[in-house]
Image (tube, grey):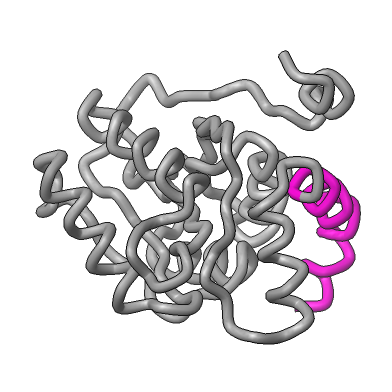
Amino acid sequence: MSLLDWIFGWMLVPDNLPKEQAMAIFCHTYGTTPGFKSLTAVSQAAMEKAIELIVKGKSYLLILPVGSCGENEERKIRQEIAQKAGIANQISFLRGVKSTYDEAAAIGNLIVGGNILVVADRYHMRRSLQIFRACLPGTKLYNASSVCLKYDEPAVPPSLFSFIQSRQIRSKFVSILWNNLFYLLTPILVKRS
Protein backbone atom coordinates (compact mmCIF):
# COMPACT_ATOMS: atom_id res chain seq x y z
CA MET A 1 0.00 0.00 0.00
CA SER A 2 1.42 3.36 -1.01
CA LEU A 3 1.42 6.44 1.21
CA LEU A 4 -1.21 8.02 -1.06
CA ASP A 5 -3.43 4.95 -0.74
CA TRP A 6 -3.08 5.13 3.03
CA ILE A 7 -3.89 8.85 3.20
CA PHE A 8 -6.77 8.77 0.71
CA GLY A 9 -8.01 5.25 1.40
CA TRP A 10 -11.26 6.64 2.83
CA MET A 11 -12.43 7.51 -0.66
CA LEU A 12 -12.02 4.01 -2.06
CA VAL A 13 -15.31 2.15 -2.51
CA PRO A 14 -15.42 -1.64 -2.13
CA ASP A 15 -16.60 -3.52 -5.21
CA ASN A 16 -20.31 -4.35 -5.22
CA LEU A 17 -20.99 -6.93 -7.92
CA PRO A 18 -24.49 -8.07 -8.89
CA LYS A 19 -25.58 -11.61 -8.05
CA GLU A 20 -27.72 -11.63 -11.20
CA GLN A 21 -26.66 -10.41 -14.63
CA ALA A 22 -26.68 -6.61 -14.93
CA MET A 23 -28.50 -4.96 -17.83
CA ALA A 24 -25.18 -3.42 -18.88
CA ILE A 25 -21.64 -2.70 -17.78
CA PHE A 26 -20.62 0.92 -18.22
CA CYS A 27 -16.85 1.49 -18.45
CA HIS A 28 -15.54 5.03 -18.02
CA THR A 29 -13.01 6.35 -20.51
CA TYR A 30 -9.86 8.20 -19.58
CA GLY A 31 -8.77 8.97 -23.13
CA THR A 32 -6.04 7.99 -25.52
CA THR A 33 -2.35 8.78 -25.53
CA PRO A 34 -0.98 11.62 -27.70
CA GLY A 35 -1.10 10.61 -31.33
CA PHE A 36 -4.11 8.38 -30.58
CA LYS A 37 -2.01 5.20 -30.74
CA SER A 38 -3.35 3.53 -27.59
CA LEU A 39 -5.58 4.02 -24.58
CA THR A 40 -4.07 5.74 -21.56
CA ALA A 41 -2.99 3.30 -18.85
CA VAL A 42 -6.02 4.30 -16.76
CA SER A 43 -8.39 3.65 -19.70
CA GLN A 44 -6.68 0.35 -20.48
CA ALA A 45 -7.01 -0.85 -16.85
CA ALA A 46 -10.72 0.07 -16.77
CA MET A 47 -11.36 -1.63 -20.11
CA GLU A 48 -9.56 -4.80 -19.00
CA LYS A 49 -11.67 -4.90 -15.82
CA ALA A 50 -14.88 -4.44 -17.83
CA ILE A 51 -13.90 -7.21 -20.26
CA GLU A 52 -13.11 -9.51 -17.33
CA LEU A 53 -16.63 -8.89 -15.97
CA ILE A 54 -18.27 -9.53 -19.38
CA VAL A 55 -16.33 -12.80 -19.71
CA LYS A 56 -17.45 -13.81 -16.19
CA GLY A 57 -21.07 -13.28 -17.28
CA LYS A 58 -21.86 -10.21 -15.15
CA SER A 59 -23.60 -8.70 -18.19
CA TYR A 60 -23.95 -9.26 -21.90
CA LEU A 61 -23.60 -5.59 -22.91
CA LEU A 62 -20.55 -3.34 -22.44
CA ILE A 63 -21.21 0.39 -22.94
CA LEU A 64 -18.13 2.47 -23.76
CA PRO A 65 -18.13 6.26 -23.98
CA VAL A 66 -16.14 8.00 -26.70
CA GLY A 67 -16.35 11.74 -26.87
CA SER A 68 -13.09 13.20 -25.86
CA CYS A 69 -10.32 14.23 -28.22
CA GLY A 70 -9.85 11.59 -30.93
CA GLU A 71 -13.30 10.06 -30.68
CA ASN A 72 -13.03 7.95 -33.85
CA GLU A 73 -9.52 6.78 -33.01
CA GLU A 74 -10.53 5.81 -29.48
CA ARG A 75 -13.52 3.89 -30.81
CA LYS A 76 -11.27 1.95 -33.21
CA ILE A 77 -8.78 1.12 -30.43
CA ARG A 78 -11.59 -0.08 -28.15
CA GLN A 79 -13.11 -2.16 -30.98
CA GLU A 80 -9.74 -3.85 -31.57
CA ILE A 81 -9.36 -4.65 -27.86
CA ALA A 82 -12.92 -6.05 -27.74
CA GLN A 83 -12.25 -8.09 -30.90
CA LYS A 84 -9.12 -9.63 -29.36
CA ALA A 85 -11.09 -10.47 -26.21
CA GLY A 86 -13.86 -12.08 -28.27
CA ILE A 87 -16.59 -9.66 -27.17
CA ALA A 88 -16.80 -7.34 -30.20
CA ASN A 89 -20.52 -8.11 -30.67
CA GLN A 90 -21.22 -7.14 -27.04
CA ILE A 91 -20.09 -3.50 -27.11
CA SER A 92 -22.02 -0.32 -27.69
CA PHE A 93 -20.58 3.20 -27.87
CA LEU A 94 -21.86 6.42 -26.34
CA ARG A 95 -20.73 9.25 -28.60
CA GLY A 96 -20.15 12.90 -27.79
CA VAL A 97 -19.77 12.59 -24.02
CA LYS A 98 -17.04 14.68 -22.43
CA SER A 99 -17.53 14.27 -18.67
CA THR A 100 -18.88 11.92 -16.03
CA TYR A 101 -22.04 14.08 -15.96
CA ASP A 102 -22.51 13.64 -19.73
CA GLU A 103 -21.95 9.89 -19.40
CA ALA A 104 -24.53 9.52 -16.61
CA ALA A 105 -27.11 11.59 -18.51
CA ALA A 106 -26.57 9.53 -21.68
CA ILE A 107 -26.91 6.27 -19.75
CA GLY A 108 -30.11 7.65 -18.23
CA ASN A 109 -31.52 7.97 -21.74
CA LEU A 110 -30.64 4.33 -22.48
CA ILE A 111 -31.47 2.56 -19.23
CA VAL A 112 -34.51 3.53 -17.22
CA GLY A 113 -34.76 1.63 -13.95
CA GLY A 114 -33.11 -1.77 -13.96
CA ASN A 115 -29.47 -2.05 -13.02
CA ILE A 116 -26.02 -1.16 -14.29
CA LEU A 117 -22.51 -2.15 -13.29
CA VAL A 118 -20.14 0.85 -13.34
CA VAL A 119 -16.42 0.30 -13.93
CA ALA A 120 -14.10 3.19 -13.05
CA ASP A 121 -10.63 3.89 -11.71
CA ARG A 122 -10.68 3.26 -7.97
CA TYR A 123 -10.07 6.95 -7.16
CA HIS A 124 -12.85 8.03 -9.52
CA MET A 125 -15.44 5.50 -8.31
CA ARG A 126 -16.88 7.38 -5.30
CA ARG A 127 -17.53 10.51 -7.39
CA SER A 128 -18.79 8.47 -10.34
CA LEU A 129 -21.35 6.64 -8.21
CA GLN A 130 -22.44 9.91 -6.63
CA ILE A 131 -23.11 11.41 -10.07
CA PHE A 132 -24.81 8.28 -11.41
CA ARG A 133 -27.09 8.09 -8.33
CA ALA A 134 -28.11 11.72 -8.85
CA CYS A 135 -28.72 11.29 -12.59
CA LEU A 136 -30.26 7.80 -12.51
CA PRO A 137 -32.77 7.65 -9.67
CA GLY A 138 -34.49 4.28 -9.58
CA THR A 139 -31.57 2.49 -11.25
CA LYS A 140 -29.74 -0.07 -9.11
CA LEU A 141 -25.99 0.66 -9.32
CA TYR A 142 -23.25 -1.89 -8.88
CA ASN A 143 -19.56 -1.11 -9.11
CA ALA A 144 -16.16 -2.61 -9.83
CA SER A 145 -12.99 -0.56 -9.53
CA SER A 146 -10.00 -0.86 -11.79
CA VAL A 147 -6.50 -0.36 -10.43
CA CYS A 148 -3.90 1.53 -12.42
CA LEU A 149 -0.36 1.88 -11.12
CA LYS A 150 0.91 4.14 -13.90
CA TYR A 151 -0.71 7.40 -14.92
CA ASP A 152 0.27 8.75 -18.33
CA GLU A 153 -0.48 11.76 -20.50
CA PRO A 154 -3.70 11.74 -22.52
CA ALA A 155 -4.33 13.47 -25.83
CA VAL A 156 -6.50 16.44 -24.95
CA PRO A 157 -7.77 19.49 -26.81
CA PRO A 158 -6.15 22.77 -25.71
CA SER A 159 -8.05 24.53 -22.90
CA LEU A 160 -7.43 25.33 -19.25
CA PHE A 161 -9.93 22.69 -18.14
CA SER A 162 -8.38 19.98 -20.32
CA PHE A 163 -4.90 21.02 -19.15
CA ILE A 164 -5.98 20.42 -15.56
CA GLN A 165 -7.67 17.16 -16.56
CA SER A 166 -4.55 15.93 -18.34
CA ARG A 167 -2.49 16.64 -15.22
CA GLN A 168 -5.08 14.75 -13.23
CA ILE A 169 -4.73 11.64 -15.38
CA ARG A 170 -0.93 11.87 -15.62
CA SER A 171 -0.32 12.14 -11.86
CA LYS A 172 -1.82 9.81 -9.27
CA PHE A 173 -1.57 12.50 -6.57
CA VAL A 174 -3.30 15.15 -8.70
CA SER A 175 -5.91 12.57 -9.74
CA ILE A 176 -6.75 11.85 -6.11
CA LEU A 177 -6.99 15.56 -5.25
CA TRP A 178 -9.09 16.27 -8.36
CA ASN A 179 -11.55 13.50 -7.55
CA ASN A 180 -11.79 14.59 -3.89
CA LEU A 181 -12.51 18.18 -4.89
CA PHE A 182 -15.18 17.22 -7.40
CA TYR A 183 -16.67 14.64 -5.02
CA LEU A 184 -17.31 17.53 -2.63
CA LEU A 185 -18.64 19.76 -5.43
CA THR A 186 -20.83 17.12 -7.11
CA PRO A 187 -24.05 17.90 -5.19
CA ILE A 188 -23.80 21.53 -6.29
CA LEU A 189 -22.85 20.72 -9.88
CA VAL A 190 -25.61 18.13 -10.31
CA LYS A 191 -28.25 20.60 -9.08
CA ARG A 192 -27.05 23.20 -11.62
CA SER A 193 -27.20 20.86 -14.60
Q: Residue at x 28, y 37 (%)?
A: 51
Q: Is residue 56 left or right of residue 42?
A: left
- Left or right of 188? Residue 172 is left
Task: Identify the residue shown where x is 88% and y is 24%.
Answer: 7
Q: Quadrant of the N terminus?
A: top right
Q: Is residue 94 above or below residue 177?
A: below
**Quadrant occupied by the C terminus:** bottom right
| Front one among 45 and 167 | 167
Which residue is farthest front? 35
Give the percent coordinates (x, y) of residue 177.
Answer: 85, 47
**Does the magenta portion include 33?**
no
Q: Residue furthest bottom?
A: 158
**Count of residue discs:** 0
Question: In the image, which residues are magenta?
Answer: 175-193
Where 1 falls versus 103 (above or below)? above
Residue 84 in the image, given as x and y percentages of width and height: 12, 44
Q: Is residue 135 left or right of residue 43?
A: right
**Residue at x 84% of width, y 29% of height:** 8
- Determine whether, in the image, residue 43 is placed left or right of residue 172: left
Q: Position of residue 152 (x, y in %)?
A: 57, 52
Give the image quarter of residue 192. bottom right
**What is the chief secondary structure element of the magenta stretch?**
helix
Of residues 165 and 119, the one drawn nearer to the viewer in this rendering:
165
x and y percentages locating residue 30 in the rendered image: 52, 57
Give me the residue at 81% from left, 27% from top: 4
